[in-house]
Image (cartoon, helix red, strand yellow):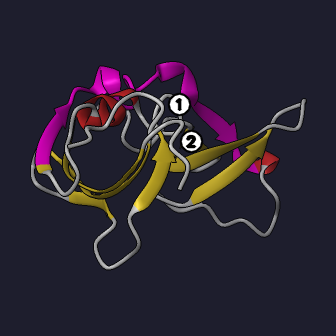
Amino acid sequence: MSLVKENDTVKVHYTGKLADGQVFDSSEGKDPIEFTLGQGQLIPGFEKGLINMKLNEKKTINIPKDEAYGDSREDLIQEVQKSELPEEIKPEVGMGLVSKSQDGREMNLVVAEVKEESIVVDGNHPLAGKDLIFDLEVVEIKETGVKE
């Protein structure tokens, strides 16, 4: 029986939850996600939780924030004057914005607070600072070096 190991490509059904049971993402009703372990495509705790799982095995893993999206960083929260925003934008709490840096990189931001003359935007990942729980089911394992 094959077990999931580093560099294998796997297909996995998952449901991601917060400690209070709130579901934030799931593959239920969709195709399972497919990825190769060790490529840094997913958070470290997710990949680590899959190691040594068998085909069709189900398990629940707890991922501490350090192996997920890390702590929420204060340096990613900033105040922006409304006058710096494009005229057509009417900011509301929870609204997503995209900021472009000088070198052309895009950063996703969320409006955290709307004040009279400014807004507070948060560039942290929405799950930063949170421990995560995942229900996993391995539905396919493509072992490294094995031709299909």
How far is disc 2 from disc 1 in space, using C-alphas?
27 Å
Mark 1 Cα shell of 10 Å, populated few (<14), some (14-19), many (≥20): few
- Dividing the image into 4 quarters, which one contains the N terminus? top left
Q: Residues within 10 Å of mark 2 (few under 14, many from 20)?
A: many
Q: Is residue 58 above or below residue 78?
A: below
The residue under the point 38% across, 76% down is 30
* Helix, strand or loop at mark 2: strand
Q: Which residue does the numbered mark 1 point to in the structure image?
A: 40
Q: Nearer the viewer, residue 105 or 114?
A: 105
2 or 1: mark nearer the eye: 1
Q: Residue 130, image x and y in percent?
A: 26, 34
Q: Is residue 118 shown left or right of residue 44? A: right
Q: Is residue 115 left or right of 104 when viewed as pictured?
A: left
Q: Residue at x 20, y 40 (%)?
A: 53
Query: As displayed, is residue 11 above or below residue 122?
Result: below
What is the x, y in percent for residue 94? Answer: 46, 58
Which secondary structure, mark 1? loop
Q: Give residue 7's mark.
A: none
In the drawing, does residue 14 fall left or right of residue 103?
left
Amino acid type shown at disc 1: Gly
Residue 146 covered by magenta stretch: no
Residue at horizontal 33 percent and vertical 67 percent from the top? 27
| Residue 119 in view here | yes
Is residue 48 positioned above or below 104 on the image? above
User: Hey, what amino acid is under mark 2?
Assistant: Val
Judging by the rendered image, the residue that carries numbered circle 2 is 121
